[in-house]
Amino acid sequence: MAHIAIMPRQGNTVESCIIVDWKVQEGDRVAPDTPLCDVETDKATFEVPAGAEGTVLKLLSARGDDVPVLKPIAVIGSPGEDWKAALDKTAPGPGEEALRLPEEPIHEALSGFTPVQEGRPEAASPRARQKAEKEGLPLTGLTGSGPGGRILERDVEEAFKERPRCTAAAREALRAGAVMPHAPGSGLAGRLTLGDLTAGVSPAPVGTIPSVPGGEETGPEGEGKSAETPVKGIRKIISDRMLLSLRENAPCTLHSSASAVRLKEMRERLKAADASLGLANTSINDLILTAVSRILPRFPYMNAHKIQDPRTGETLVRTFERVHLGVAVDTPRGLMVPVIRNADLRSLRQISAEAKWLAAACNQGGIGPEALSGSTFTVTNLGSLGISSFTPILNPPEVAILGVCGIELNPLSIGGDMRFEPTIGFSLTFNHQVVDGAPAARFLKALGEAVADIDLWLL
């Protein structure tokens, strides 16, 4: 019997993976542990094993395709076996998900959650809205069968029957406003592809400059050639996640600063400390990470996730006792956020060593997906680039992210005299849906006070 290899799930927040390269070809003989392909998410790159012994009958996606998790990517069986028949046995019915994961009991899903009501002015149930959003189906124009014409999940499922299923890229295009074509889809099992939605549209040639009213070009002559680079691969995933973060949250950013006098003094003392202590390479960022890990337990509403009950669509806030600190790392592949787990229980030396190891693993491409998930709060540092303030983007499902800025000299009035003192800037973005401005400001104030007295407080 043929085996269907699927795109594995890599963490709760990863919805799709990009196929970087196929390691096998159709007709190749494989063992269960033979790597089929390399795939990547916005977090990491990893191999997908065959999972069964046999012959590769069909590769269902091409290099560069963005494939949803738990979707078939290859069929493995005996030579001459009908791969289409094997695949049809796993095909979902209208409005259903293929290879659905078993649902967890409701008491486990809600354990430790505090509900937060969220207003929804549109006349549609949360389950209907979630299903429509996932498939890129606009609710406008649907007829609701619920009380007062409310659109229910069954109304959305009925609408699915009137249109073909879509690829992940096609769903994103439909969400963005693409028009549903009348012709059937050209993808596997009649699925609509991105090409079906853009068929007949003639884009401008790469490198050309569009014209403006009056027939004049937007750029002056002799300015040189322009270049256009497609947003795809890991950059496309990061782009989509950033847009999703802004679309599903209510971000608000507060800016503040704290004295960096003792912070810099402590850094110099650690550089001169005995090498056996293992603290000579401690950075300013390591000190900030340690301070954040000590302050967060006093403000549990900042060390939290905003999620939705999968059954009712109700917004929930889950707080955590332990601090799993995400640390934003700039890599050649794009932004990555490895996690220092149980940071509140670790020493300065341990946090410093872990942060450096994680950053090196990210840049060398050797970090696994397990090290890039589960953070409860994120810190991103642009201070070394001379940034005095910025607006960090929330890392869903977290409710807050701290931006660390540069150290600058600022004038202070002390006893009637003016003097300049080094200060470090902080930019805190939080989700105003679940955290108000004053509580967020209290956290930021407490962090600033801890940093200002860090030589006494941390030791």
Image: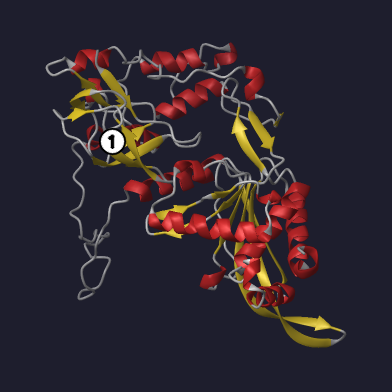
Q: Nearer the viewer, residue 144 or 422?
A: 422
Q: How is the image coloured?
A: secondary structure
- Pick the quarter of the image with the N terminus: top left
Q: Residue furthest front?
A: 276
Tell me: 78 left or right of 213: left
Q: Residue at x 48, y 48 (%)?
A: 242
Residue 291 x/y as whole percent: 70, 59
Q: Is residue 57 above or below residue 82?
A: below
In percent of the image, x 24 and y 62: which residue is there?
A: 227
Q: Quadrant of residue 399?
A: top right
Return the residue nearer the eye: 394 or 275.
275
Residue 416 is situated, as x and y percent measured from the top left of the image, at 86, 86
Determine whether the residue tagged by mark 1 lies in a helix, strand or loop: strand
Image side of residue 90 versus residue 286, left or right: left
- Residue farthest along the right direction in this orientation: 415
Which residue is tagged 1? 35
Q: Give the number of callouts.
A: 1
Q: Is residue 168 above or below residue 447?
A: above
Q: Quadrant of residue 45?
A: top left
Give the amino acid at mark 1: Pro
In terms of image quadrants, where is residue 40? top left
Q: Visible in this render: residue 367? A: yes
Vertical placement of 407 versus 44: above or below?
below
Name which residue lies at 42% across and 48% down: 238
Residue drawn where x is 38% and y is 26% of the image: 70
- Name the quadrant of the C terminus: bottom right
